[in-house]
Amino acid sequence: MHHTTVRARPAGRKLVGAIVSLVMAAVALTACSAANPGASAESETPETTGVDVIFVRHGEAKPSQGPLSELGLQQVAELATTLQDEPVIAVYSSMMTRAFQTGAAVAESHDLPLLADSRLNEVDLNEGLSDADKGVEILRRMAAWLDGEDREMMYSAEGDYNVLNDRFHAWWPEFVADFRQEEGTVVVAAHFATLSLMLPTICEGADLTADFILNEHPLANTSMIRTHLNAGGSLTCEEWDGAPIPTS
């Protein structure tokens, strides 16, 4: 089972919200019909705006695949403060400790459960690399994958582009089905390579090149990618670590 809920969400919140939304929609529809009786059925149907989705890289970890460092704990506390005024309705993370701790800080600040899912875990590109070569070689491998090259290469059991792509795209349709008719903000805490490699596959109309992602705007710890999940299921990606995302 991929998905783990750390704390049960209070029952009835979505049902009450749905009832209130239906009542408000009925009132709005009645007013619209009275003002414009000749309007088409399509124009009379209220639109659902969709939900904002904030993808965030975890805080600093030491060792790099371990738990958060002292600095990392400070970073995620600041992240939680930054997001305090966001209307957060759900928080997701990978099952890896550093992302789990990052998501937990945000979830706790909004009194929400943390929804941890192994399909958001990091891809392993470190195996067999020396510390001296690691940084440059990982970026080279990621750039090739982003350019559509060397995707058949398996660098480790968890260092395979196609494995990452398959598990992420098993999670994504479930997420879309759960939240495209919601309103508010969902936070997803994950990892540098997973976010850098997978978001270009779901950001509709975005021109997310390897140069933009890896050279111009590499995701630092607790960097955010702001997106909007539309009611139709498409994802509009707006900002990458504060920089406007170019369109194709």
Image: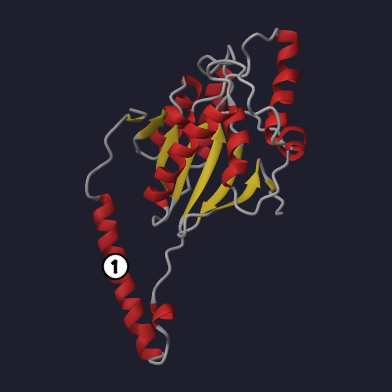
Q: Nearer the viewer, residue 106 or 49?
A: 49
Q: Which residue was labeled with disc 1? A: 22
Counting labels gives: 1
> Is residue 115 left or right of 239 when viewed as pictured?
left
**Image position, residue 143 (x, y; %):** 72, 30
Say which amino acid is labelled 1: Leu
**Image position, residue 235 (x, y; %):** 54, 52
- Residue at image point 30% right, 75% down: 26
Above or below, 186 relative to 162: below
- Residue at image point 43% right, 53% down: 184
**Image position, residue 140 (x, y; %):** 74, 24
Quarter holding residue 192: top right
Mark 1: which secondary structure? Answer: helix
Q: Nearer the viewer, residue 41 or 189?
A: 41
**Image position, residue 233 (x, y; %):** 47, 55
> Is residue 89 left or right of 131 when viewed as pictured?
left
- Residue at image point 61% right, 28% down: 193
